[in-house]
Amino acid sequence: MLRERVTEDVYVFISELYVEVAATVVITEKGAVVIDTAPFPQETRQIREFALRHCPQGVRYVINTHHHADHIYGSYLFPEAELIAHRQCRQILLKVGEESLAKAKAQTPALAPVQLRIPQLVFETEMLLRLGEKTIHLMHAPGHTPDGIMVHIREDKVLVASDVVTPIPLIVRGDIEELTKSLKLIKTLNLENIIQGHGGVLLRGEIEETVDSNVAYLRNIEKRVRTLVEKGQSKTALRRISVESCGKSRIPLGGLAQRLHQANLEYLYNKMMAEKADQNPK
Ligand SMILES: [Zn+2]
C-alpha cells in the first residue's frame, strides 16, 4: 500500500494489489473519517493501523463512495465506525451484496475473511458531516454507477472524486450523460487536489485539464460508436477506435487503460444496438 500525504490532515492510500484503487483517511481531533477502503484485508488493515495511530479517538465514520467491491470490501474492518453511503448503494448491497461477495470469494481466496457491511446512514442529494474542525460535504455524483458520490473536504480543498475521476472514464453499466454532469459539478468547487478512484492524486494545475479531457473523451466515444452503429458495422470494428484517437493515453493504470477503453466501447455498442432494435421492431 502506498501512502501519500495530500494535506496536513488528509492521507491517501493507493493499493498495490488492485488497479491503484484509492482509500482516503481524514484526521480530525474528534476521530478519523475513512473514505473507501482497499479490497484486500491485508491492505485495509494497514489503513486501520495508520488511522488509529494518528487518531486516538478512533475511526468515527467510513464512507462507501459506491457499491463496487474494490472500494468497499474493507468496511468490515472498522466495526466501531458508522457506515455512510448513498441510499441506492444501501439498496444495491441489500439486494446483491451477499451473492456478489460469495462469487468473489470463490474466485479470490484472499477475500475469505471479508464480511459484507450494509451502510446504515444514507442520503439522497447531499449530506454535511461536521467532525472536529472539518466540514465534509458528500454529494450524489452518478454516472460511473447510479449510487456514486463524491466527498469534498472543504477546509482542505480536497475532493475525493472516487470513480467519477479516473485516468480513463469508466462507464461500463454506467451512463455517459450523468457522468458528464458529475464531472461538470467538479468545476464549481474550489479545489487544490482531487483524489481519483484509481490512479492517484491530481494537483491543482491538472484538475481543469483532466476534467475537460474526460468530458471530451466521453463525447468522442459516444460519437464514434454511434457512427459505427448507424452504419450497421459489426462489433469487431470497435477495435479500430484507439484510446489515443479519443483523446486519452493508454499508459496509466499499468497499461490497463486500453482494455478499459475497449470495454467502454463494447458497452456503448451493445446499448446503442439494443436501442436501435427497440426503434425498428421486426
Ligand atoms: Zn467502481
Image: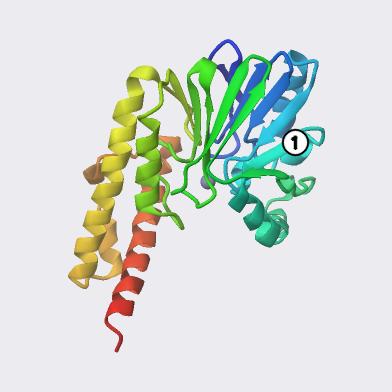
Q: Residue at x 32, y 39 (%)?
A: 214
Q: Quadrant of residue 253?
A: top left
Residue type at tag 1: Glu
Q: Position of residue 133 (x, y in %)?
A: 64, 14
Q: Position of residue 97 (x, y in %)?
A: 68, 56
Quarter holding the C terminus is bottom left
In this orientation, does residue 140 appear?
yes
Which residue is most to the top?
8
Q: How many marks?
A: 1
Q: Residues within 10 Å of mark 1 (few under 14, many from 20)?
A: some
Q: Quadrant of residue 43?
A: top right
Q: Position of residue 122 (x, y in %)?
A: 65, 44
- Residue 14 lies, with reference to residue 96, above or below; the image says above
Q: Which residue is mark 1?
A: 82
Q: Residue at x 25, y 40 (%)?
A: 247
Q: Residue at x 61, y 14 (%)?
A: 9
Give whichever of 8, 135 is nearer the camera: 135
- Residue 153 lies, with reference to residue 272, above or below; the image says above
Give whichever of 223, 147 is nearer the camera: 147
Quarter holding the N terminus is top right
Question: What colour scheme governs how the chains and residues are painted in the rendered image of this protein?
Answer: rainbow
Give whichever of 176, 251 is nearer the camera: 176
In this orientation, does residue 100 appear?
no
Q: Position of residue 30 (x, y in %)?
A: 74, 17
Give whichever of 62, 233 is nearer the camera: 62
Q: Is residue 55 left or right of residue 10?
A: right
Q: Is residue 50 left or right of residue 181?
A: right
Q: Residue at x 32, y 64 (%)?
A: 269
Q: Quadrant of residue 76?
A: top right
